[in-house]
Image (tube, grey):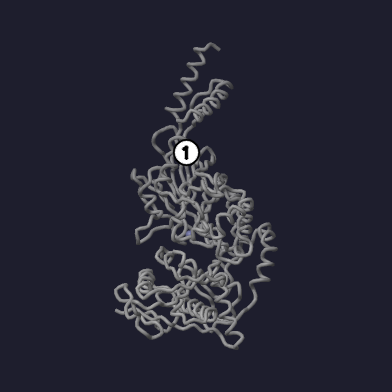
Amino acid sequence: MQRRTFLKRVSTASSLMALGALPAEAFYGAEELTRITIMHTNDMHSRIEPFPMDGTRYEGRGGVARRAAMITNIRKEAEHSLLLDAGDIFQGTPYFNLFGGEVEFKIMSKMGYDAATFGNHDFDGGIDGFERQMPYANFPFVISNYDFRNTILNEKTKEYLIFEKGGVKIGLTGVGIELKGMVPKSLYKETQYLDPIKNANRVAKMLKKELDCDYVICLSHLGFKYDEDKVSDHDLAAQSRDIDMIIGGHTHTFLDAPVVVKNKRKKPVIINQAGWAGIVLGRLDLVFERNKKNKCVTCQNQLIG
Amino acid sequence: MTNLRILVMLLSIAFLTTHCKPKQHLAKVESKSQEFSKDKNLSADEEIQELIEPYKKLTDQQMNRVIGEFTEEIIKAQPESTMGNFCADALYKTAKDYNGDSIAFAIQNYGGMRVPTIPGGEVTRGKMYELMPFENRMVFLDLNGKEVLRLIEHITARGGWPVSASLRYEIYNDKPIGIKIHGDALEEEKIYKIVLPDYIANGGDNLDFLTKIESRKDTDKLIRKAFIEYILEHTFAGIQVNPQLDGRISVKE
Ligand SMILES: [Zn+2]
């Protein structure tokens, strides 16, 4: 345990102790369940309005105004929730060509997004274009494998974030896809792409071991799975140790249910993705049981229902 | 409190926090992803609607203008498709008008087309922004026959990219065979002027070898503008745009 966390805990405990001799059970009662609702999107691609009614595949689907209403409804019921995005917010409709991302960020801010990571298309207005739009985003950008030190985004993104929800400490990190060959260098400039698996593992380990997180989520714009030899969410999951959930993007994958992949410790990692264009709002409810035993009483083998 | 008492207390708290620390076990996960647009009772969020309104007005003003008509729905597919043929033929036509030189062929990267279909009937300027949202520009490259072959091998390995009607070939065991340019077989030493988006010429999709081509001419012409002008030309001539599959890329069993 890190010294600072320890001291913080001691001081809280001491002040409680001072109120009277409380038995340990009072702090940590029997099983206590906490439900945390994770809502997520990916590859929104500037789809502000629903798809037009023109006989094409997605006609009438999507649209931010109705998605916002749904998020509000979910929040009314869910005491603890997070709203996350896995990148490619930009590019795909004239809203981006005309306004450069301002509309997308303003809407996401109003919807109350907690964090987002970078997709390749988020560089389409150039790294400078992204930086110019950042003031419209009231939520942070989290990424562990883009080194922005020699760019305008230096110190403007986070390697990780920690959210405390109903006594559960959730760590969040993010990974992005290799930009070379996909995005012109003139747009991403001196951004250095680092190994996503190595860096996500490094940050996840820190979140679990040093920063005391109960659960680690990784936002990913690597892509769901590939036939060719290209790093994907499946690879990241299989080669990870401390990541519990991957919220993916890039491959525009619609899933009927999340996929579970065993990590290096043979523990399950949940992978989910919500198609694209904001057609689907991804949602996973995590139920945590808090107790002081080593065994979980209500656990259902992480059954996904 | 004496120092000893404080020490004992701290130690016992330390014991409590480390040994009896409650753990958060993940008991279950419920998947509840939802397509909200299927919920007929869900109305739009008014604040968001208000936020969008001024932007929508400006966007509609610029994008809702009808520029022409497609005879039928055009579809994005591989190795050859009506959408791909439209894009590559439009680029080829614009390049010819622009350069005057004889152009061997035009090529468009498959992933650069950003909509799966465009319906038949009226087409708006905005639709062309959706098809080609990128600010990609037209580039001319002079390639020798060997380099042309390498490029065609690359796009064949990728499943086939849009090419103009002036280029025809067959795919056999994932390799291009019988390459013909303007009806003539590809010659290794001959120089061919090709036109393509700067995205590819700059090494996009790992076509790094194209960045080393010395004879190159960059232009200010946006690829999207080439598409729009191609449609407008049809409209001014009083005809619809009617891209057809003509077997320019075919698969040999
Ligand atoms: Zn992407």
Q: For label 1, count other residues whose C-alpha is less than 10 Å away and answer few (under 14), some (14-19) or many (20+).
A: many
User: Which residue, given by chain and number where applicable, does mark 1 sit on?
Assistant: A213
Residue in front for this viewpoint, B129 or B38: B129
Please say if B101 is above or below A295.
below
Residue in front for this viewpoint, A94 or A24: A94
Residue at 49% across, 31% down: A28
Residue in front for this viewpoint, B187 or B241: B187
Residue at 38% across, 47% down: A268
Residue A7: percent from left, percent from top: 52, 26
SS category of the residue bearing label 1 = loop
- Is residue A232 visible in the rendered image? The answer is yes
Residue A293: percent from left, percent from top: 41, 33
- Is residue A59 visible in the rendered image? The answer is no
Most extreme residue toward the top, as rendered? Answer: B2
Question: Residue B61 sits in which quadrant?
Answer: bottom right
Please, which chain is the residue tagged with disc 1 on? A
Please say if B177 is above or below A226.
below
